[in-house]
Amino acid sequence: MVRQFEGGARVSVHYHKFDLPDGVDLGPVVAVDTETLGLSLVRDALCVVQLSAGDGHAHVVQLDRSTYDCPNLKALLQDPLVEKLFHFARFDVAMCKLHLDVDVAPIFCTKIASKLARTYTDRHGLKDLVKELTGVELSKQQQSSDWGAAELTDAQLHYAASDVLHLHACRDRLSVMLEREGRMELARACFDFLPVRAVLDLAGWPDQDIFAHT
């Protein structure tokens, strides 16, 4: 299905049940986001994974929560030759580890990149980041929504797509800033640690700083 999105751009939203189709090629860098029933790793289910190659097209995969059988999606998330681009990867990576049993890598997280590069602000949410770096105003109207419904609405599909359509542009701008400030190597080290951070969250250390003296 094709719908009109912000800024007058037309984007294609491809809605898939249970897995990505065979043969979908999203290139060497793919933007990824998840939708869940809530923000608790121990209570709330993973319902939807959306992806984009940064070309104005989004693929929204509604998962089968009885099996989480999605071999094509799992293969992509673990492909060492494809960088997975998230905003706040810590949560999404933990959800994928818990429900899909995959170790997502390699990773670029625009939230971590923003905190390391945009030290002139404390506004690192996706809406603020996209607005500053791309000029696009994202709608968060469907953020609180029943993602466990049997069928997703057009509004939900549009919302899910909007969360991944602009991450490539943000990554490009943030990479320039990180390189300029000499912080790209530090950012990459943080990205590489994210799968371990996710395991710590799932194992019961979501808030405690295990590196602290006390």
Image (tube, rainbow, N blue to C red):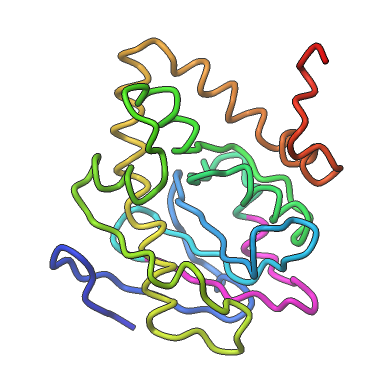
Q: Which residue is drawn at 50% across and 54% down?
A: 32
Q: Which residue is drawn at 79% across and 75% down?
A: 67
- Viewer-closest of 150 and 207: 207
Res 168 → quadrant: top left
What is the span of residues highlighted in magenta in the rendered image?
58-75
Q: In this view, does 206 lie to the left or right of 132?
A: right
State whether residue 182 is above or below residue 114. above
Q: Give how far across and how far down residue 127 sits, in percent.
A: 34, 51
- Viewer-closest of 145 and 50: 145
Taking the view exactly as shown, the residue that stands out farthest to the front is 214
State whether residue 203 is above or below residue 121. below
As for residue 74 lying within the magenta part, the answer is yes
As for residue 179 lying within the magenta part, the answer is no
Q: How many circles with numbers are drawn on the protein?
A: 0
Taking the view exactly as shown, the residue that stands out farthest to the right is 203
Q: Quadrant of the N terminus?
A: bottom left
Q: Is residue 130 left or right of residue 183?
A: left
Q: Give how far across and how far down residue 105 sits, in percent.
A: 63, 40
Q: In this view, does 93 lie to the left or right of 121?
A: right
Q: Is residue 107 left or right of residue 12?
A: right
Q: In which quarter of the image is the C terminus?
A: top right
Taking the view exactly as shown, the residue that stands out farthest to the bottom is 150
Q: Residue at x 52, y 57 (%)?
A: 33
Q: Give how far across and how far down residue 65 sits, in percent.
A: 74, 76
Q: Residue at x 44, y 15 (%)?
A: 183
State whether residue 185 is above or below residue 128. above
